[in-house]
Amino acid sequence: MTRRLVVALALLMALVFATALLPRRAAANDDLVYIIPAAIGGAVAIVLIIAIIMADRSDDELELAGEPPPAALPQSSVRLAPDCPPTAGGLPLLCW
């Protein structure tokens, strides 16, 4: 008897889950009422965040010439194109 009860409960649960997981019929709805204000609010928030970040900077942070040049690499190391001398074929991407 318990076996029949288990099978009956399993069938009943399968039926309940099958009907609960059926998708609803497609219906047209107008979500632009929510999308447009959210997009405008997001754009305003981004502009405000950028404005706050730029207002908190000092003049020293915006100058590019304030940093010392990087130390020269030894000749035995691999260097990138700006530090390589031009060759007959042009500028190499890497040199050592």
Image (tube, rainbow, N blue to C red):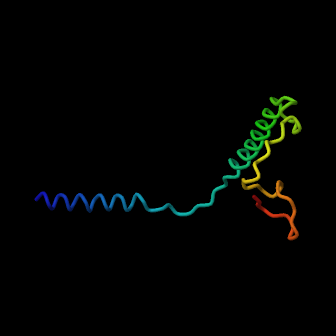
Q: Judge by depth and name the residue closer to the eye, 55 or 44.
A: 55
Q: Judge by depth and name the residue closer to the eye, 24 or 71.
A: 71
Q: Quadrant of the C terminus?
A: bottom right
Q: Quadrant of the N terminus?
A: bottom left
Q: Residue at x 88, y 30 (%)?
A: 59
Q: Residue at x 76, y 60 (%)?
A: 94
Q: Judge by depth and name the residue closer to the eye, 67 or 52.
A: 67
The picture places residue 43, in percent across and down from the top left corner, at 76, 44
Classify residue 2 as left or right of residue 63: left
The residue lying furthest to the bottom in this view is 89
The picture places residue 74, in percent across and down from the top left corner, at 75, 49
The picture places residue 42, in percent across and down from the top left corner, at 73, 43
Q: Judge by depth and name the residue closer to the eye, 84 or 67.
A: 84
The picture places residue 93, in percent across and down from the top left corner, at 78, 62
Q: Residue at x 79, y 38 (%)?
A: 50
The residue lying furthest to the left in this view is 1
Q: Quadrant of residue 70?
A: top right
Q: Quadrant of residue 40?
A: top right
Does residue 34 lie above or below 2 as drawn?
above
Classify residue 19 as left or right of residue 55: left
Q: Residue at x 79, y 32 (%)?
A: 52
Does residue 68 lie above or below 32 as drawn?
above
Image label count: 0
Classify residue 7 as left or right of residue 49: left
